[in-house]
């Protein structure tokens, strides 16, 4: 965008998920911390033309030299993390939270003779049990109001309690059943303390009976058409779930740990490290490493930890996505970094709040790997070098300015489809993507042969440009191929990935790549020879070792694992695989939906409910009649018809 800072990130690199962003200067000082429900939409406001920005915002953007972001689960967690980092970094351009306002907690004063429940920001009440913090005070107050019906304990102030004792009359909460009224002796102090213990147990997540009870009441009210009561119960459930939701950003205050997330492919790995001290995320580190060898996740964890703690002291707990084989020896090494007599636990989070935070760290690692690939592929110098290296490695007379890659996808031999993706000058040309439906085939090599033969037919015709009518005919043939017995043909993807066939489909590539090794390359060579088209280089990339196979070659071409050439070939192969599997899933979904639509009594809503309930077509096919009947709206006769229909497949 014109008239803005030169360092602005590309919009496509910014995730459209909730998170927290940090503007930093040349010295890595944090200038501003903000939160957003949609990071991409929010950050785009900062990179509008400078003349349109507020003076303070413009000054901050001009002072900054970089912006970083951290993805979280929802906007509540973004608010929590924003608060933590504003307190941690004290950014000069932030004005929120300067009054040291803290988050509200729910407290139960178990040390009092008559325990009281209250919402407070004071963490110094003697012998109190605290729950939270919560990002919305109204949510926890509404929840307390609801739960007092099930756990009618004292919530009034000391003055109100003493006045009730003196007058012998309970307050309004006692009259409406939201307090057991120990002030007037309706229950003993021991009975009241038992109620308070039950309340605390529920808040600790050890008992969900109250929530289940309200759900039952809501369903009963709806069944008797008492919709006002059902709506009240619905609102109560919403308030309780909001307050009791596990917070994966703020943990218990005694948690001191480092959380590692790793996203990797055959060539690179992105690492994210969340530093948690006192239950709050105090810092985030991230880096990308090149993989010279094909190591598993456990091996990556070992090398990552050695790098991370080479010059820093590890905490007591280190949570990783997978344990290496020699985890005991690694724990001993980490303990030595802490000091004599110290101990470090290396483990994988399995459940609870730590597992939720570990998932957030992994999400950020995946985003970092995607961003790394995007930046690397967007480097013009790197792309030019990659094309030159491919030309040299494959012995081509010129650099492959246009490359096409083909991949086949199927599910146990059914719904066989293929994809063609196009890269020009090292960048994807999505408007030239094509997809293919294959009616009959014997194996993947036969599928590759069929697809390339159909694609090369355009070139064999002397680069003839199809008319608009021919393009529409091609699309119509694809629609016919969706039905049994129809001929397979090329098709236009009805998404943003591809458009209706254009004359560019007849433009010859310099390099054709197939996903696979020697068998797939041999099938592609046979299709190329039969088409009579010349001047096109063939190659295949085998996924296990990332080796390049050429026709009639006994040995593969081995490109350096950290080379831009292999990165580019891998990227076009992965894009072809993504495009093929997306189309295959769409075909599979349409296929099963069309079959189920012929069952009497099944409409679109019940078909959707069936697929959502079982999660996959395979599980639905393997289900018994008793399991199918569990889906709302499906009776025994309909379940039997579904089994009979799917059994004919």
Image (spheres, helix red, strand yellow):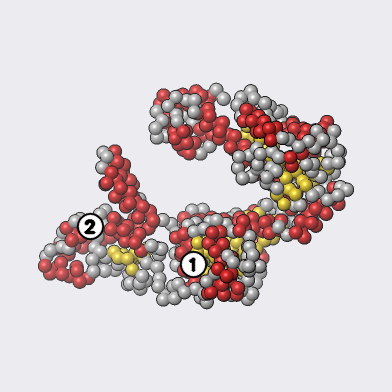
Q: In which quarter of the image is the C terminus?
A: top right
- The residue lying at 57 percent from left, 75 percent from top is 59
Question: In this rendering, is residue 22 above or below 511?
Answer: below
Q: Residue 12: in sight, yes or no?
A: yes
- The percent position of residue 342, horizontal first and vertical second, equals 56, 70
Looking at the image, residue 550 sits to the left or right of residue 239; the answer is right
- Nearer the camera: disc 2 or disc 1: 1
Q: In which quarter of the image is the N terminus?
A: bottom right
- The percent position of residue 635, horizontal first and vertical second, equals 39, 28
Q: Give 15 or 324, whichever is nearer the viewer.
A: 15
- The residue lying at 59 percent from left, 38 percent from top is 585
Mark 2–mark 1 Cα distance, whole angstroms, equals 36 Å
Check residue 432 in the rendering and tell me which mark sits there, or answer none. Answer: none
Question: In this rendering, is residue 98 above or below 47?
Answer: below
Looking at the image, residue 22 sits to the left or right of residue 193; the answer is right
Q: Give 37 or 475, whichever is nearer the viewer.
A: 475
- The percent position of residue 121, horizontal first and vertical second, equals 36, 70
Judging by the rendered image, the residue that carries numbered circle 2 is: 178
- The residue lying at 69 percent from left, 35 percent from top is 468
Q: Is mark 2 on a helix, strand or loop?
A: loop
């Amino acid at each position: 965008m014109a008239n803005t800072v030169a360092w602005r990130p590309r919009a496509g690199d910014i995730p459209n998920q909730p998170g927290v962003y940090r503007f930093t200067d040349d010295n890595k000082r944090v200038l501003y911390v903000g939160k957003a429900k949609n990071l991409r939409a929010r950050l785009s406001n900062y990179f509008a033309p400078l003349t349109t920005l507020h003076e303070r915002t413009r000054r901050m953007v001009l002072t900054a030299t970089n912006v970083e972001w951290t993805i979280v689960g929802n906007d509540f967690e973004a608010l929590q993390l924003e608060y933590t980092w504003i307190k941690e970094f004290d950014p000069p351009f932030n004005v929120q939270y300067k009054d040291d306002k803290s988050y509200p907690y729910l407290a139960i004063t178990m040390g009092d003779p008559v325990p009281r429940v209250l919402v407070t920001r004071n963490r110094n009440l003697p012998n109190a049990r605290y729950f939270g913090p919560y990002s919305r005070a109204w949510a926890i107050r509404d929840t307390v109001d609801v739960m007092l019906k099930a756990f009618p304990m004292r919530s009034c102030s000391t003055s109100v309690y003493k006045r009730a004792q003196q007058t012998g009359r309970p307050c309004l909460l006692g009259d409406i059943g939201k307090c057991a009224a120990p002030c007037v002796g309706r229950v003993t102090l021991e009975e009241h303390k038992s109620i308070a213990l039950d309340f605390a147990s529920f808040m600790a997540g050890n008992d969900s009976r109250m929530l289940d009870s309200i759900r039952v009441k809501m369903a009963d009210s709806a069944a008797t058409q008492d919709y006002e009561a059902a709506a009240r119960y619905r609102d109560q459930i919403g308030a309780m779930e909001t307050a009791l939701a596990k917070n994966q950003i703020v943990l218990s205050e005694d948690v001191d740990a480092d959380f590692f997330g790793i996203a990797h492919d055959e060539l690179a790995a992105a690492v994210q490290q969340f530093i948690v001290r006192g239950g709050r995320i105090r810092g985030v580190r991230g880096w990308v490493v090149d993989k010279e060898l094909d190591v598993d996740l456990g091996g990556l964890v070992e090398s990552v930890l050695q790098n991370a703690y080479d010059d820093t002291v590890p905490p007591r707990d280190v949570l990783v996505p997978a344990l290496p084989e020699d985890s005991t020896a690694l724990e001993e090494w980490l303990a030595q970094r802490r000091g004599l007599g110290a101990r470090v636990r290396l483990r994988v989070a399995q459940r609870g709040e730590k597992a939720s935070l570990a998932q957030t760290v992994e999400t950020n690692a995946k985003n970092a790997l995607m961003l790394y690939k995007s930046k690397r592929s967007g480097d013009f110098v790197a792309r030019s070098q990659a094309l030159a290296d491919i030309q040299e490695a494959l012995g081509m007379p010129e650099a492959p300015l246009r490359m096409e890659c083909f991949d086949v996808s199927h599910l146990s031999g059914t719904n066989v489809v293929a994809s063609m993706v196009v890269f020009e000058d090292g960048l994807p040309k999505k408007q030239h993507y094509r997809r293919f439906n294959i009616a009959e085939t014997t194996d993947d090599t036969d599928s590759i042969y069929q697809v390339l033969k159909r694609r090369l037919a355009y070139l064999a015709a002397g680069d003839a440009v199809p008319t608009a009518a021919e393009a529409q005919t091609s699309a119509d043939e694809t629609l016919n191929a969706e039905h049994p017995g129809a001929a397979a043909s090329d098709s236009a993807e009805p998404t943003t990935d591809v458009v209706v066939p254009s004359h560019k489909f007849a433009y010859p590539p310099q390099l054709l790549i197939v996903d696979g090794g020697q068998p797939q390359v041999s099938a592609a060579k046979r299709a190329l020879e039969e088409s009579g088209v010349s001047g096109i280089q063939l190659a295949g990339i085998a996924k296990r070792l990332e080796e390049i196979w050429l026709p009639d070659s006994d040995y593969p071409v081995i490109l350096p694992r950290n080379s831009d050439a292999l990165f580019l070939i891998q990227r076009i192969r992965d894009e072809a695989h993504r495009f093929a599997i997306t189309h295959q899933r769409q075909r599979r979904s349409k296929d099963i939906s069309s079959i189920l639509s012929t069952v009497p009594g099944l409409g679109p809503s019940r078909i959707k409910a069936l697929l959502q309930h079982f999660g996959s077509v395979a599980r639905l096919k393997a289900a018994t009649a008793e399991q199918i009947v569990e889906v709302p709206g499906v009776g025994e006769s309909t379940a039997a018809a579904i089994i009979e229909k799917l059994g004919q497949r």
